[in-house]
Amino acid sequence: MLARILQHIGFGHKGAAGVAVLHLREHDIQLLLKPANSATATVQVQAINQGRWQLAVQEMLAKVSKSMALTLIIPPAMYQIIQLEKPAIAETELLAALPWQIKDLTDIALDELVLDYIDLPAAPGQPDKINVVVSGKSQLQELVALVTDAKLQLQQILIEEWLIHELIENADHAALVLMHQPDQDVLLQVIRQGQLQFSRRLRGFSRLHQYSESELQQGVFDNLLLEIQRSMDYIESQLKLPPVRNIHLLCSGAERTNLVPLFHQAGFSQVQNLQLKPELQWAAGTDVNECWPAIAAARSTAEEPSV
């Protein structure tokens, strides 16, 4: 959660009458509503016209009950992720020190930086590492102001890269998740024991949802397989993680090709479309490929302690 941008407002969902997740995407906004007394969730989508995301956000926020806990998911265009060695200082001092550690690694001005971080496992014998997410204060304040004007309870601000673990069963073996959304690079992550172990963007596959099967077989799919295999080799040889046992696939886009048979034909028999856990059956009526970030964020919000 990008906690520092929320320090100036009171937030929480004690006694909330359900969960709302607003997901800002490249060309539209997705709103998931899960009332506390309902066994199902509903999803609505609002197009962003001429880049006017503020107007679309206002229209969607008007559909959220003021008694619901609200989570925001911001798009990759609103943040950057930087990996670096974890400074050897107290945890209580880390957030204050990180802006000076990364000021030369981002194009966001120092006085505009808002950040948070998560720990990553280090390779044996190597220093601990962290993933730092940085965003611009002004843009986030503009977004938070829209929520405040709507008199809603803002619980957390999240990014897609830190969500998928909510959908994966805890296990000692490593699970690889391959995620793609239109006009974004493929996101590959490895989850083990409920924790993010490895994450990378696979460049050059932003149109994966538009390729036909014949187009994929003209080299695109082979390149994707190569990048996946490289990642699997790295986590075993360098991070010393157990071999990947499951590969979960999440590909959005109305015209997407079913990739699972292609993976099986190439010898990747462990690839399957991601299936919801039993405790997430309230989302069974949604398109998981399209809505997984919102589903994961709703689960995260529901598990947040009351404040």
Image (tube, rainbow, N blue to C red):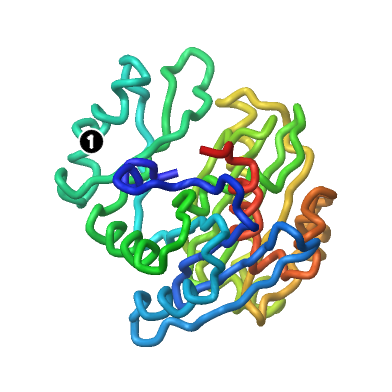
Q: Nearer the viewer, residue 127 or 261?
A: 127
261, 171: nearer the viewer:
171
Image: 46 above or below 41? below
| Residue at the (65%, 38%) spot, across then down | 191
Q: To which residue does mark 1 refer?
A: 99
Q: Position of residue 49 (x, y in %)?
A: 39, 86
Rendering coords of residue 89 (x, y %): 31, 15
List x then y, in percent, for residue 283: 75, 62
Q: Using the image, determine if residue 82 lies above or below residue 210.
A: above
- Amino acid of disc 1: Pro
Asked which quadrant contains residue 190, the reply is top right
Measuring 67% from the left and 34% from the top, which residue is drawn there?
194
Q: Above or below — where is 291 with respect to 129?
A: below
Q: State the residue at coordinates (61%, 77%).
A: 44
Say if residue 271 shows up in the picture. Answer: no
* 32 and 213: which is toward the camera: 32
**Left or right of 87, for residue 242:** right
Residue 250 visible in the picture: yes
Where residue 186 appears, as percent x and y from the top left, is 54, 59
Q: Quadrant of the N terminus?
A: top left
The picture quadrant where one finds residue 48 is bottom left
Q: Is residue 152 above or below residue 155?
A: below
In the image, is 25 to the left or to the right of 167?
left
